[in-house]
Each structure stands twice: as structure tokens, then as C-alpha cells.
Amino acid sequence: MDNAKKTHDEEEFHWTKGLIFTAIVLFPLIPFVLIYRHKFTRKTKIILMMAYFLFLTAIYQIACMAQGASIHSVAIADRYVTMRQGDTYQIHYTTSPQKDKLTITNVNYHSSNRAVASVNSQGLVTCLSDGNATITVSVTDNHYTTKEKTLHFVIVE
């Protein structure tokens, strides 16, 4: 079905700030309030609250595991590269754990000196003039974990 033809019942659900606040903060507090207000002994209340806290922690851990692995590190083969003006260099990186076990959401390349070496969004470095430049590779996964590595270029005529 075309997006333009969606009926009122088929519209996408959007989380508002109030719903997010309720889901994260207030909803988990309800069992704590019920435990506190009930006429349990102090020891029973503490045990029930700790059990509920452990339950919430387990739910959070299961949700995190369902999202897949988190990036531990990024590696690049070369750390220092000497090139001639006008040459190109393709940056290749590896991740730990391997890319097929991660959900990588963003890869950015940044040149410290674009007049000396520029880099495009696919990691292709173009050496423009003689000098030094540092290229930074930033890899972000679906847990918003970002790891960076730098590559130092010396460009000669």
C-alpha cells in the first residue's frame, strides 16, 4: 500500500516526550509504590524491591542482547602513509567483532587538512598538495558506540 493512501488507523505511532517519560520512569515505579504501600514486613519489602530491580535489569540486558553486539574496536592496516601529489588511497578498516556481527549505522571520514588531502564518504583519500594531513575514521554502531582511528599522511611532490 502506498504511504500516501494510509488511512487514519494505519498511521505510524510516534513516541512523545510524555510517553517516553512514562515508559522509562513512571511505569517501573508502580510496583515499587505497591510494594511500599502494602503491609509487608520491612524485610519482605526489601526482598521484593530487590527482586523487581533484578527483573528490570534482566529485561534491559535481554533487550540489549537482542540489538546485537556492540563495537569494541576499529583497526586500519596502515597508520602512516607517504604518497605523491595526485595519488589516491582507499582506506580499509576492520572492526571487532566482525562487521557481519555488528549493525554499523554510520562511518565518517574527516581530514585535518583538506588542502593537503581530501577524503570522500567512501574513504577514498586524494592527495592534493605536499604537506601533512591526518584522516580520522569514525565508526558508529546501533548502540551509539563510536570508535575512531587515525591515519597520518605525508604527501610529497
Image (cartoon, helix red, strand yellow):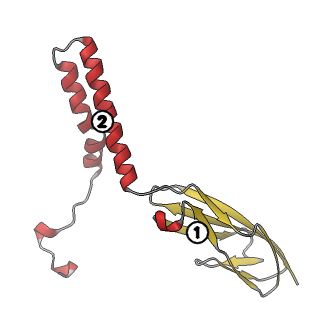
**What secondary structure is found at the residue carrying circle 2?**
helix
Q: Which residue is mark 2?
A: 55
Q: Earlier in the sequence, mark 1 or mark 2?
A: 2
Q: Which residue is mark 1?
A: 108
Q: Quadrant of the N terminus?
A: bottom left
Mark 2 crowd level (few <14, some 14–19, many ≥20, 10 Å Cα): few
Residue 65 in picture, x, y percent from top left: 39, 52
Residue at the far bottom in the pictured view: 86
Mark 1 crowd level (few <14, some 14–19, many ≥20, 10 Å Cα): some
Question: What residue do we see at 22% from left, 20% from top?
Answer: 36
**58 on left or right of 26:** right
Nearest to the observer: residue 117 or residue 75: 75
Q: Amino acid at mark 1?
A: Asn
> Residue 2's mark?
none
Nearest to the observer: residue 130 or residue 123: 123
| Residue 124 picture quarter | bottom right
| Alpha carbon distance from label 1 to label 2 | 38 Å
